[in-house]
Amino acid sequence: MKIKNYQTYVIGTPWRNLTLLVIETDSGIRGIGESRVVGKTHTVLEYLKDIRRHIIGAEVTDIEHLYRKLTLLD
């Protein structure tokens, strides 16, 4: 099962934004995650755009490989 697509959503108030990440697999399963970094919502969104090419097509169950791939990008 591979990651087919993901979308980001920002909800909240001016003092507290939540960034939601909705991931969809090639079999139609969706998962949701959230992040909150006070005053840095734009940074989170830019990071998620930047890593898109590494996420799309990744195997959902190989979390360790994906983690290593994303942490070694810098």
Image (tube, helix red, strand yellow):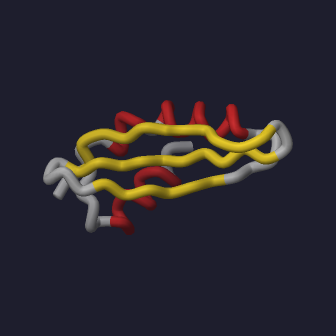
Q: Position of residue 8 (x, y in %)?
A: 49, 38
Residue at x-position 36% and y-position 66%: 63
Q: How many marks?
A: 0
Residue at x-position 42% and y-position 38%: 7
Image quarter (top left, top right, bottom left or bottom right) of the N terminus: bottom left
Instruction: Name, please, the residue furthest toward the right.
Output: 15
Question: 71 or 2, which is in the foreground?
Answer: 2
- Please give left or right for residue 19 compared with residue 51 in the image: right
- Please give left or right for residue 66 compared with residue 49 in the image: left
Q: Position of residue 17 (x, y in %)?
A: 72, 44
In the image, residue 31 above or below residue 48:
below
- Please give left or right for residue 36 compared with residue 68 in the image: right
Question: 6 or 59, which is in the foreground?
Answer: 6
Residue at x-position 64% and y-position 41%: 11
Q: Position of residue 47 (x, y in %)?
A: 57, 37
Question: 68 or 8, which is in the foreground?
Answer: 8
Q: Position of residue 26 (x, y in %)?
A: 16, 48
- Please give left or right for residue 10 compared with residue 51 in the image: right
Q: Quadrant of residue 35?
A: bottom right
Image quarter (top left, top right, bottom left or bottom right) of the C terminus: top right
Residue at x-position 48% and y-position 47%: 21
Q: Quadrant of residue 42?
A: top right
